[in-house]
Image (tube, rainbow, N blue to C red):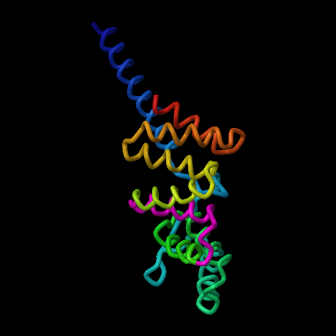
Amino acid sequence: MKDKKTLGFFIAGALLLMIAVYNYFQLTASQPVRNEDASSEQTGISSIEGKTMPDNHDQLVQVQQLMEYLKSNPTDTDHWIQLGNMLFDAGNFAEAIEPYRTALQQRSENNDVRTDYAVCLFNTNRSDEAITELNVVIKNNPDHATALYNLGVIHSHNGRNDQARIFWNRAIQAAPNSDIAPKARQALTNLK
């Protein structure tokens, strides 16, 4: 009898471990990525003057300097993009939306910025808007692997796994040797 209980606990433990591993891979495979730096490290964030800013002191100073600079140079698209990227990399998606939106108003054809903007929208629970923005990217560049991958992530997140498969397969076809392809393959594996 004791051996059956031990075996039962062992099996239950193994099942819990398998569930935990499965959930880990589900989470890591279905996170949208930033266009140019899919492997960038995330830093912490802290609040200053009612705004959420990067936690790293040097980054905070850079963000403040950029914001000050942009007050007197509001048409400097490259610096709006830089500000959006810094906030994005800090994991501050809500604050990155406005710099990206401003950059897109000045340079609407920038598919990479539009892709990052869409990820920010998704991460602030605005999936429909994110899909709209990514569809603009795909219309402009049908082989934009990061946009295709992120469309797959959003569709998967919203329970539309058939759509997710289509976009992840397209991402792999568009850029089979890119950093996106292994992520898309893993995401497809996790759906099966």
Residue 92 spot, x, y in % from top left: 50, 67
Q: Position of residue 184 (x, y in %)?
A: 57, 39
The percent position of residue 76, horizontal first and vertical second, equals 66, 83
Depicted 125 relative to depicted 171: above or below: below
Q: Residue extending furthest right?
A: 177
Residue depicted at x 46% and y 59%? 132
Q: Is residue 95 magenta?
A: no
Q: In this view, which residue lies farthest toward the front?
A: 139
In this view, which residue lies farthest toward the left? Answer: 1
Residue at 63% across / 54% down in the picture? 141
Q: Which one is in front, 126 or 105? A: 105
Q: How many marks?
A: 0
* Part of the protein shown in magenta: 106-126
Per the picture, the main secondary structure of the magenta-coloured stretch is helix
Q: Quadrant of residue 56?
A: bottom right
Please say whether residue 115 is one of the residues in the magenta stretch. Answer: yes
Left or right: 69 in relation to 54: right
In this picture, residue 73 sits left or right of residue 25: right
Identify whether 175 is placed above or below 138.
Answer: above
Front-lying residue, 190 or 24: 190
